[in-house]
């Protein structure tokens, strides 16, 4: 053990979750006829469960490694059991026929279709489950079960055993509205598409007839049929365009939809007139095609938007929380939002404090790291204040609630964040800005052209004006940016960055500064041993062995820095009377000697001497190992810097970005890491307010700031930066305030993201250039009367298609990975690896 | 060519049926998730739970 240099074997990746296997561990499992390395007992347990249920095929089907089960938020069976309470179930469970209950669940940790397959298969085998359907896109599950045969907590527990999270979820009105919008758009698209196909078929007949000659009765019949089919397309499928155009006009604005609606309506009205009067031209086909292609573009954009929104809300919305209220010494389970000031609440070991209050009874240690970043738990005795959202340690506490609900410190932070988000400088969409200038121009131009052609007859003047309107329709222009942004969003998601808000890509290519939080972002947020120094005549290795033995009995994050002793040679048998003192360390008796490891002062108490004179020179957390005769060895622990952090920082600097770090940690620790990573600017001992002010100052001087953070204390500053990126393993609050979430624990994705954003800008410029160029070229032709409305519509559509295809390239720019045809890729994989 | 007076209304009828079927499918949630069913058709059924390998 001792130093982290350890052995220098090539780092293997865990077969289950893909994380590097820590040195010195030897978890293995036979899967698919070979012994596979595993990184932790959690992965082994999940893999054994999967194999034991005969679902081992999961490993062949999956496209990505699973989520590490130990990173999934830990839920104990007790915690799940509260979801069985009738009082709580009333808020999210629907009762069906007989004993059938139905609930919507928010799923966490889903990676690909194989995850869905695995969970559905496993749950269907549980007794009492009547239905389980999981939607991968929205990360929701519909679960039905027969109460009495099973319990909700049992089923949630089964999902947890597979290494995924499932939480009761109550869809809010926004989600329901999105669902309805999606279905309506799909229906409209079908009507427009099928209608356009039909009408174009009749149009072929009409054009052929116009060339070869056809009976008047046949021509009129085809026109009437075309009118019949076009009517639902205009009235039903094109409704959103009319609604949006009308809203724009009422607000005295001229949006993109005004000329669209005008062109559709006038083409339809003129064609209807021509059909009724049996003279003139009809443009039903142009109108239908126009509606269909425009709807298609909007539909694709909407789908990408909804998917992002669903994911974000799943991360943001927590399941209903409960607390144990004490009423005359009776325990009573209540929902957290029912708590009021004055209530006495029992906080069990490991539970989250439900509201702000004071300790009334009990002495314990509370971890406030979510607020302060301090890893050591704080000692709480009767009379001490506790803050809602912090985590209780090992002993039960009774607290009296001072403030609950919206008055708590946590709710205050959330409000601060919300305000910052509202203050965010709006980066208006480029297309909308262009449209404000372009659209009125198009309308005026069409009117002028109509006037100029009036002498040649109103009929001719009409279709020339219509051609101008359609040809110059800023359709390609309006698709140029959103299509590129949507494609880039998909490309980023494939690389591991989930973009949840529209302005991220624009923000990324304009970015001038990247600001990182330290703990949990540039560092892993996990302790690592950096130095061990023997203080007496004992070897460091021996001290390390003792420390590892002692710490293997502790659950504290620091304990994980020590290697658990390898399956012992009978020596650990001599270790007895081990006590883990929360906030202090671990004590025990080994081979008859008393040992303590932990806080220096506490360890020094053992031998009665004062704290050792030699204090460690660095600021890293330092702990001491000692026996009755005094300190034996000092260990310095540090939060490990991510392996790719330095590379990422350098790559960002190479791209001309200023990289900074802000941290709540003390100056020395911040300075050391800044030096290691080559950061010139680093801010230490910063409160959430300081961070906020720092970023605002940067912005005031014209900087476009990308902020990367993970904790609650980062949430306000995430809300104010132009682009906020949260770590996927971070707190829910941070993720909900961010514009993008790093799904992989890999900072270098940021560099990819910046590159892709810059490529996106190039594609957007190409698209705009093309769209404008096409319009400039086609406009004189149309105004000159050389382009019929049909050719205008076709030209416009092809122009839009080129723009969209150019944008789609962005999504495809993922190196060395099979693209879209994942089903084909999977077939290939199966051919290579035949089922056992 | 007078046959079109019969054939086109017939075709329109079929189109109406097709749109009706599509609306039914949308209401039934057939389009809610387009990713999973596309791949899960390729996944085999269960293997015997003999602690077997994959």
Image (cartoon, helix red, strand yellow):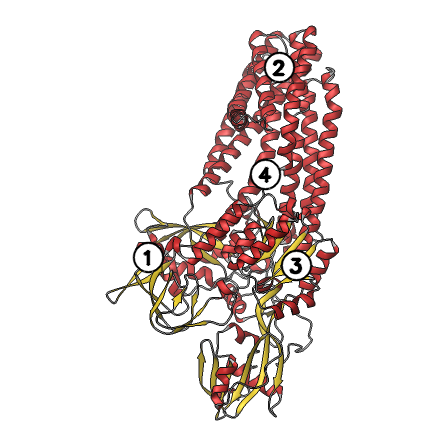
- Please give the residue where the numbered disc 1 appears in the rendered image: A339
**Could you tell me which secondary element the residue under label 3 belongs to?**
strand
- Please give the residue where the numbered disc 3 appears in the rendered image: A660
- The local crowd at label 2, few if under 14, some if 14 to 19, many if 20 or more residues have their Cα within 10 Å, is many
Please tell me which of labels 3 and 1 falls first in the chain. 1
Q: Residue at x 47, y 49 (%)?
A: A140
Q: Are marks 4 and 3 in contact (CB under 8 Å)?
A: no
In this rendering, the label closer to the viewer, 2 or 4: 4
Q: Residue at x 43, y 54 (%)?
A: A411
**Could you tell me which secondary element the residue under label 2 belongs to?**
loop
In this rendering, the label closer to the viewer, 3 or 2: 3
**Could you tell me which secondary element the residue under label 4 belongs to?**
helix
* Residue A589 in the image, given as x and y percentages of width and height: 47, 89
Please tell me which of labels 3 and 2 falls first in the chain. 2
Mark 2–mark 4 Cα distance, whole angstroms, equals 31 Å
Mark 1–mark 4 Cα distance, whole angstroms, equals 43 Å
* Residue A213 in the image, given as x and y percentages of width and height: 68, 9
Q: Residue at x 53, y 20 (%)?
A: A231
**Could you tell me which secondary element the residue under label 1 belongs to?**
loop
- The local crowd at label 4, few if under 14, some if 14 to 19, many if 20 or more residues have their Cα within 10 Å, is some
> Which chain's residue wears label 3?
A
Label 3 in the same subunit as label 1:
yes
Label 2 in the same subunit as label 1:
yes
- The local crowd at label 3, few if under 14, some if 14 to 19, many if 20 or more residues have their Cα within 10 Å, is some
Label 4 in the same subunit as label 3:
yes
Instruction: Give the camera-side residue of A103 and A558.
Output: A558
In this rendering, the label closer to the viewer, 4 or 3: 3
In this rendering, the label closer to the viewer, 2 or 1: 1
Please tell me which of labels 4 and 3 falls first in the chain. 4
Instruction: Give the camera-side residue of A491 and A502.
Output: A502
> Which chain's residue wears label 1?
A
Report the disc number at residue A282: 2
């Amino acid at each position: 053990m001792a130093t982290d240099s350890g052995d220098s074997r090539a780092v293997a990746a865990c077969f289950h979750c893909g994380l590097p296997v820590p040195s010195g561990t030897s978890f293995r499992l036979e899967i698919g006829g070979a012994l596979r390395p595993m990184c932790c007992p959690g992965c082994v347990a999940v893999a054994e469960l999967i194999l034991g249920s005969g679902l081992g095929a999961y490993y062949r089907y999956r496209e990505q490694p699973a989520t590490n089960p130990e990173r999934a938020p830990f839920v104990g069976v007790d915690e799940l059991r509260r979801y069985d309470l009738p009082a709580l179930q009333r808020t999210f469970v629907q009762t069906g026929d007989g004993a059938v209950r139905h609930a919507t669940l928010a799923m966490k940790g889903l990676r690909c279709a194989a995850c869905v397959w695995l969970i559905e298969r496993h749950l269907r085998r549980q007794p009492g489950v009547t239905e389980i359907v999981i939607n991968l896109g929205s990360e929701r599950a519909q679960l039905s079960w027969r109460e009495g045969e099973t319990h909700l907590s049992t089923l949630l527990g089964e999902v947890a055993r597979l290494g995924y999270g499932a939480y009761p979820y109550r869809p809010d009105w926004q989600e329901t509205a999105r669902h309805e919008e999606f279905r309506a758009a799909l229906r409209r698209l079908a009507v427009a598409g099928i209608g356009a196909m039909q009408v174009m078929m009749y149009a072929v007949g009409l054009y052929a007839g116009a060339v070869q000659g056809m009976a008047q009765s046949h021509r009129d019949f085809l026109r009437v049929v075309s009118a019949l089919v076009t009517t639902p397309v205009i009235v039903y499928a094109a409704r959103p365009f009319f609604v949006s155009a009308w809203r724009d006009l009422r607000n005295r604005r001229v949006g993109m939809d005004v000329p669209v609606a005008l062109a559709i309506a006038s083409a339809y009205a003129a064609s209807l007139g021509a059909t009724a009067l049996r003279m003139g031209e009809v443009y039903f086909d142009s109108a239908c095609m126009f509606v269909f292609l425009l709807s298609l573009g909007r539909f694709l954009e909407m789908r990408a938007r909804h998917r992002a929104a669903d994911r974000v809300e799943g991360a943001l919305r927590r399941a209903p929380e409960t607390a144990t209220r004490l009423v005359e010494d009776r325990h009573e389970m209540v929902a957290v939002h029912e708590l009021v000031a004055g209530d006495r609440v029992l906080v069990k070991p490991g539970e989250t404090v439900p509201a702000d209050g004071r300790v009334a009874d009990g002495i314990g240690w509370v971890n406030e790291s979510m607020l302060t970043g301090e890893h050591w738990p704080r000692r709480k005795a009767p009379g001490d204040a506790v803050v809602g959202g912090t985590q209780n340690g090992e002993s039960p506490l009774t607290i009296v609630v001072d403030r609950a609900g919206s008055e708590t410190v946590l709710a205050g932070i959330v409000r601060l964040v919300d305000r910052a988000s509202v203050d965010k400088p709006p980066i208006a969409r480029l297309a909308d800005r262009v449209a404000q200038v372009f659209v009125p121009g198009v309308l005026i131009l069409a009117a002028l052209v109509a006037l100029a052609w009036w002498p040649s007859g109103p009929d001719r003047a009409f279709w020339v004006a219509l051609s101008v309107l359609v040809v110059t329709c800023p359709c390609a222009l309006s698709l140029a940016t959103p299509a590129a942004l949507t494609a880039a969003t998909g490309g980023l998601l494939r690389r591991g960055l989930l973009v949840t808000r529209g302005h991220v890509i624009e923000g990324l290519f304009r970015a001038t500064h990247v600001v990182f939080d330290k703990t949990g972002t540039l560092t892993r947020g996990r302790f690592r041993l950096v130095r061990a120094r023997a203080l007496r005549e004992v070897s460091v290795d021996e001290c390390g062995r003792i420390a590892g033995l002692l710490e293997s009995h502790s659950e504290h994050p620091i304990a994980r820095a020590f290697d658990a002793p390898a399956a012992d040679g009978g020596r650990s048998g001599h270790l007895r009377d081990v006590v883990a003192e929360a906030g202090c360390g671990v004590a025990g008796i080994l081979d008859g000697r008393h040992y303590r490891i932990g806080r220096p002062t506490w360890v020094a108490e053992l031998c009665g001497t004062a704290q050792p004179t030699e204090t460690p020179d660095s600021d890293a957390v330092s702990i001491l190992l000692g026996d009755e005769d005094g300190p034996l060895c000092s260990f310095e622990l540090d939060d490990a810097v991510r392996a790719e952090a330095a590379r990422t920082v350098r790559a960002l600097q190479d791209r001309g970005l200023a990289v900074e770090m802000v941290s709540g940690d003390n100056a020395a620790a911040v300075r050391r890491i800044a030096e290691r990573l080559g950061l010139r600017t680093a801010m230490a001992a910063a409160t959430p307010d300081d961070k906020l002010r720092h970023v605002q100052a940067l912005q005031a001087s014209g900087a476009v700031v990308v902020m990367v953070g993970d904790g609650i204390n980062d949430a306000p500053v995430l809300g104010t930066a132009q682009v906020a990126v949260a770590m996927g393993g971070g707190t829910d609050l941070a993720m909900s305030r961010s514009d993008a979430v790093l799904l992989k624990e890999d900072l270098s994705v940021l560099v990819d993201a910046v590159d892709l954003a810059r490529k996106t800008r190039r594609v957007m410029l190409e698209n705009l250039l093309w769209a404008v160029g096409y319009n400039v070229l086609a406009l004189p032709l149309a105004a000159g009367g050389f382009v019929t409305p049909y050719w205008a519509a076709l030209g416009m559509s092809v122009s839009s298609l080129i723009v969209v295809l150019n944008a789609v390239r962005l999504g495809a720019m993922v190196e060395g990975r099979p693209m879209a045809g994942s089903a084909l890729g999977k077939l290939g994989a199966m051919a290579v690896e035949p089922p056992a | 060519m007078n046959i079109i007076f019969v054939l086109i209304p017939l075709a329109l009828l079929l189109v109406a049926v097709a749109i009706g079927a599509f609306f039914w499918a949308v209401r039934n949630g057939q389009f809610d998730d387009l990713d999973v069913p596309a791949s899960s058709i390729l996944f085999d059924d269960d293997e015997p739970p003999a602690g077997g390998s994959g």
